[in-house]
Each structure stands twice: as structure tokens, then as C-alpha cells.
């Protein structure tokens, strides 16, 4: 009798659990029929897990359209964000190229300014030298030829040649005879020959 009761108790527990499950299912069906609960919605996740299917969106969900709209907006924002990132990279690249071009232009402008500065300095030096040559020539022309020749003999050949040329230029502009030939005649023969040779070489070349 004890052995039968032990086996019977386990069997009865299984039967009772099955009975409870049947009653629960039957109650859900009944409540669903009465419209109290939605048995399909409640049991859908269970059936989905059993079948391994994806959850089906409830078409009667009042927030379904709002959720879809939000999902599309999020997707559009993500695409827009990627486009903005790409544009930002392009702008950074273009900005780097522009900065490089600006630097090159600034370097070229500085080089041009430096060349212009050097040219102006040379031009100013040339003008200053011409002023000095004109003043020296006028000074030498105004003194006795012998005294002028003594001063010229103390100068370098190139300086003497430059004064000779300035003196000839001034005489030509004034319509007068230049004293250069006379100065040469008063100089030693070797110095006069050297000066004439250099003057003819630079004039011809």
C-alpha cells in the first residue's frame, strides 16, 4: 500500500500540473473570448520562441506610425551625419591646400619684395654715384688742367674712366669741347695709353 502511494503521488503531481496548464489556457481563451485580455498578444512571444521566428509588429499599435517615423528620422540623421563627416574631411583637405597656396604666395611675394628692394638699393647707389661723378667732373673741369690731372692720377683707372665719360656727357649736352683729350695729353704716356685702352674695350664690348 505504501509503495503504491509513493508512485501514485508523483503521477498525481504531473497530472495536476497538466490540469493547471489546461485550466490556464482555457481561462485565457475564455477571457480572450470575453474581450478581457488579448490571448494572442500574450502568447505570441511564447510561440515565437518555440518556432524561432521574429517578433511581428502589432499593426494595431497606436505608436507604430510614430515609431516608424522616429526610425526613419534616426536613419536620415545617421546618413546626414556621415555626409557631414565626409564634407568636413573635404573642407579640411581644401583648407590645407589653400593654406599651402597662401604660404607659397607669401613666399613669392616676399621674394619679389626682396628683389625689388635690392633693385631699388642698386638704383639708388647708381644715382648717388652719378651725382658724385657729376659733381667731381664739374669740380675738375673748373680747376686748372694740371691740377685736375694730379688728382686724376691718384684715382683708380675705373674711377678715372667714369669721370671721363661723365665729363664727355656734360660737354656734349652743353655743346662744348670735352677736356678729356687734354687731360690725357698731360698724363704719363703709359697711364694715358692704359686708360684709353680700357675705355675703348668697355665701349666696344
Image (cartoon, rainbow, N blue to C red):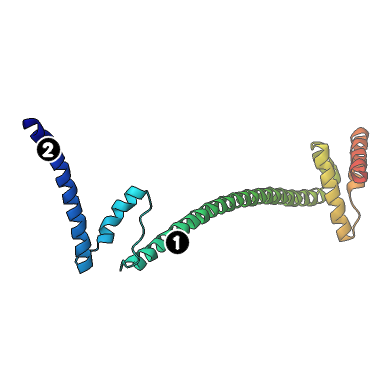
The quadrant of the image that shows the N terminus is top left
Quarter residue 154 falls in: top right
Report whether residue 35 is seen: no
Q: At which x and y percent is residue 38? A: 24, 63
Front-most of 186 and 6? 6
At 92% across and 33% down in the image, what residue appears? 190
Q: At which x and y percent is residue 96? A: 56, 50
At 84% across and 55% down in the image, what residue appears? 170
Report whether residue 32 is seen: yes
Q: Secondary structure at mark 2?
A: helix
> Does the CB distance between marks 1 and 2 fall below 8 Å?
no
Quarter residue 185 falls in: top right
Q: Is residue 170 left or right of residue 75?
A: right
Say which residue label 2 marks. Answer: 8
The quadrant of the image that shows the C terminus is top right
Please determine whether, in this image, residue 6 is positioned above or below residue 115: above
Front-most of 30 and 104? 30
Q: At which x and y percent is residue 55? A: 35, 55
Say which residue label 1 marks. Answer: 76
Amino acid at each position: 500500500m505504501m509503495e503504491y502511494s509513493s508512485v501514485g503521488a508523483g503521477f498525481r503531481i504531473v497530472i495536476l500540473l497538466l490540469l493547471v496548464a489546461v485550466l490556464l489556457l482555457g481561462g485565457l481563451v475564455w477571457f480572450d473570448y470575453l474581450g478581457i485580455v488579448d490571448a494572442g498578444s500574450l502568447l505570441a512571444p511564447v510561440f515565437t520562441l518555440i518556432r524561432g521566428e521574429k517578433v511581428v509588429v502589432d499593426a494595431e499599435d497606436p505608436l507604430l506610425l510614430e515609431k516608424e517615423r522616429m526610425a526613419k528620422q534616426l536613419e536620415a540623421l545617421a546618413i546626414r551625419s556621415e555626409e557631414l563627416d565626409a564634407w568636413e574631411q573635404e573642407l579640411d583637405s581644401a583648407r590645407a591646400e589653400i593654406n599651402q597656396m597662401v604660404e607659397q604666395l607669401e613666399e613669392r611675394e616676399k621674394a619679389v619684395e626682396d628683389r625689388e628692394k635690392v633693385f631699388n638699393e642698386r638704383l639708388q647707389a647708381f644715382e648717388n654715384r652719378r651725382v658724385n661723378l657729376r659733381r667731381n667732373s664739374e669740380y675738375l673741369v673748373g680747376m686748372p688742367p694740371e691740377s685736375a690731372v694730379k688728382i686724376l692720377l691718384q684715382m683708380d683707372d675705373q674711377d678715372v674712366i667714369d669721370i671721363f665719360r661723365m665729363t664727355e656727357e656734360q660737354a656734349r649736352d652743353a655743346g662744348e669741347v670735352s677736356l678729356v683729350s687734354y687731360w690725357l695729353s698731360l698724363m704719363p704716356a703709359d697711364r694715358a695709353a692704359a686708360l684709353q685702352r680700357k675705355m675703348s674695350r668697355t665701349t666696344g664690348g
